[in-house]
């Protein structure tokens, strides 16, 4: 049986490298030049991956915001969609996507964003700013947008993709859509992933770490495996048992770790830790939404 309380870290996790401070400053300087702000969140933590620092920037510059919940294929879709529906009911523009699979990307670019097109669009193009926490999929979205563009799809990818936080450390100007027939052009300011400066509780830190927003070495891999088993068992997600050939659910992180190590005959701990975390992050262990959305957080 899962414990009634999630594993304690025993330390405060705050990860805000210098390039994130610089990114916020440059975002503040450039936000006046964009037509719309796109906030990208992870569908597995649709509340915890919200960065309130962005809202302060948007409010100060009176900009429109559109929220994208990426990696929808990896979450409990019923739970996360309930949150999205709640947002839309109160006038917060948002939708679910899976950039890696291309789900809803064409609908987003050609339909959802049309309502935000400014009057200057026909002459200079529409400018977007894409922001989010580290490793929520910004680079994947940029490359998918370019693939949808008739003029750009044959050109090489411009945004570097990697399953690690802090892949992008500078702000880049990128053309993501160019249709010669309609003369529609869309440009985007790509920004580095920015964490919140202070994480207020252990559970939020564990959630953001387990999905890859924070480097594994900061909380440590053992607490992450412990939290993963606790969360999967609590929500009765049993796919991990079938995936690893277990007859019963793991009672704790150590039990899962030992089973995987023995099953795959690993000779060092790091290999086992990394396999379990990678298997979870790519969806092999089951779809799960880690946030409790019973009280909607806007």
Image (cartoon, rainbow, N blue to C red):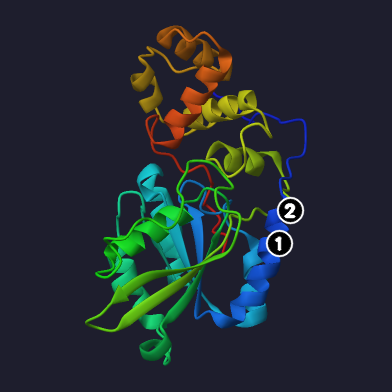
Q: Is mark 1 on a helix, strand or loop?
A: helix
Of the numbered discs in the image, which one, if any, rests on residue 14?
none
Q: Mark 2 points at which residue?
A: 18
Which quadrant holds residue 214? top right
Judging depth in this view, the residue of 152 and 253 nearest the camera is: 152
Residue 257 at x, y percent in the picture:
52, 15
Q: Is residue 147 above or below residue 59?
A: above
Q: Is residue 267 visible?
A: yes
- Work out whether 37 lies above or below 275: below
Asked whether the residues under the numbered discs 2 and 1 touch, taking CB atoms below 8 Å apart as contact, a structural biologist would say yes
Residue drawn at 63 percent across, 56 percent down: 194
Residue 205 location (% of width, % of height): 65, 41
**Dot 2: element:** helix
The Cα atoms of the two marked residues, 2 and 1, are separated by 7 Å
Position of 25 with respect to 181 (left or right) is right
Task: Give the farthest residue toward the front.
Answer: 155
Residue at left 37%, top 75%?
A: 113
- Is 163 displayed left or right of 215 in the figure? left
Residue at 72% x, 49% y is: 17
Residue furthest toward the left?
181
């Amino acid at each position: 049986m899962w414990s009634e309380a999630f594993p304690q870290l025993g330390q405060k996790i705050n990860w805000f490298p210098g390039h994130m401070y610089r990114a916020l400053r440059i975002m503040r300087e450039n936000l006046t030049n964009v037509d719309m702000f796109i906030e990208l969140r992870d569908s597995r933590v649709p509340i915890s991956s919200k960065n309130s620092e962005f809202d302060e920037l948007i409010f100060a510059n009176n900009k429109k915001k559109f929220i994208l919940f990426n990696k929808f294929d990896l979450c409990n879709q019923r739970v996360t969609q309930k949150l999205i529906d709640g947002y839309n009911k109160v006038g917060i523009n948002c939708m679910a996507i899976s950039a890696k699979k291309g789900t809803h990307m064409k609908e987003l670019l050609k339909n959802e964003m049309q309502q935000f097109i400014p009057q200057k669009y026909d002459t200079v193009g529409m400018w977007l700013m894409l922001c989010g926490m580290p490793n929520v999929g910004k680079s994947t979205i940029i490359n998918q947008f370019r693939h949808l563009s008739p003029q750009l799809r044959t050109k090489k990818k411009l945004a570097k993709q990697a399953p690690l936080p802090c892949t992008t450390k500078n702000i880049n100007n990128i053309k993501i859509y160019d249709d010669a027939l309609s003369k529609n052009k869309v440009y985007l300011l790509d920004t580095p992933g920015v964490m919140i400066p202070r994480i207020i509780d252990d559970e939020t830190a564990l959630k953001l770490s387990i999905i890859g927003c924070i480097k594994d070495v900061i909380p440590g891999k053992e607490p992450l495996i412990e939290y993963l088993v606790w969360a999967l068992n609590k929500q009765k997600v049993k796919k991990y048992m079938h995936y690893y050939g277990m007859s019963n659910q793991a009672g704790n992180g150590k039990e899962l770790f030992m089973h995987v190590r023995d099953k795959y005959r690993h000779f060092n701990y790091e290999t086992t830790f990394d396999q379990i975390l990678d298997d979870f992050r790519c969806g092999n262990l089951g779809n799960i939404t880690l946030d409790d959305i019973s009280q909607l957080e806007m």
